[in-house]
Image (cartoon, rainbow, N blue to C red):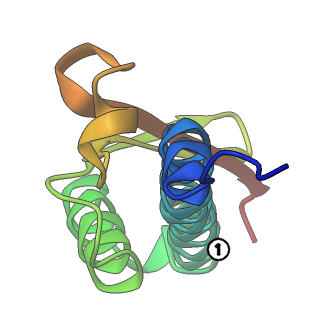
Amino acid sequence: MRLKSEKGQATVEFALVLPILLLLLCGIIDFGWVFGNQLLAENASREAARYTAIHYYDSSADDDQAAAQAIVAARAPTIDAPIVTLAILGDTVTVSVSSSIDILTPIIASMFPDGKYAVTAQCTMRIE
């Protein structure tokens, strides 16, 4: 007795598993992209807050804002048009960075409004 031909079985199994594998791969890529940009924003806000805390008495408020903006732009080059907010309360300085980044893969981008993810970071340091 001869069994029926099993040609195409692997193709059908691959077609069933392929969407799951693509979703997993795209998720890994976008998670790494978002996580890396979040770390860049946090480190940039920390650098800007540290610079402002050290040089607070050496410069004006406008110079501090411009320096914070320049530091964030230099430390986080992949973040487009970050909004840098500098607030001084008592003897502390707070630098907030916010922006949105594009999601790289279309599959995951369809799960977010406008295909963008909001990146925010904040750091507070004591003025020296």
36 above or below 120? below
In this rendered view, identify the residue nearer to me: 73 or 66. 73
55 above or below 110? below
Residue 32, position as x, y percentages in the image: 59, 64
Q: Is residue 31 left or right of residue 41?
A: right
> Which residue matches tag 1?
50
In this rendered view, identify the residue nearer to me: 100 or 125. 100
Q: Which quadrant of the figure has residue 108?
A: top left
Name the residue located 34 percent from the left edge and 73 percent from the top edge. 59
Residue 88, position as x, y percentages in the image: 55, 39
Q: Which quadrant of the figure has residue 89?
A: top right
Q: Is residue 52 left or right of residue 128?
A: left
Secondary structure, mark 1, is helix
Name the residue located 54 percent from the left edge and 61 percent from the top edge. 45
Image quadrant occupied by the C terminus: bottom right
**Crowding near the residue tagged with mark 1, few <14, some 14–19, many ≥20 C-alpha atoms within 10 Å:** many
Q: Which quadrant of the figure has residue 16?
A: top right
In this rendered view, identify the residue nearer to me: 65 or 105. 105
91 above or below 89? below
Name the residue located 26 percent from the left edge and 64 percent from the top edge. 69
In this rendered view, identify the residue nearer to me: 55 or 34. 34
Residue 91, position as x, y percentages in the image: 74, 45
Q: Is residue 72 left or right of residue 82?
A: right
Amino acid identity at mark 1? Arg
- Residue at the extreme bottom: 74
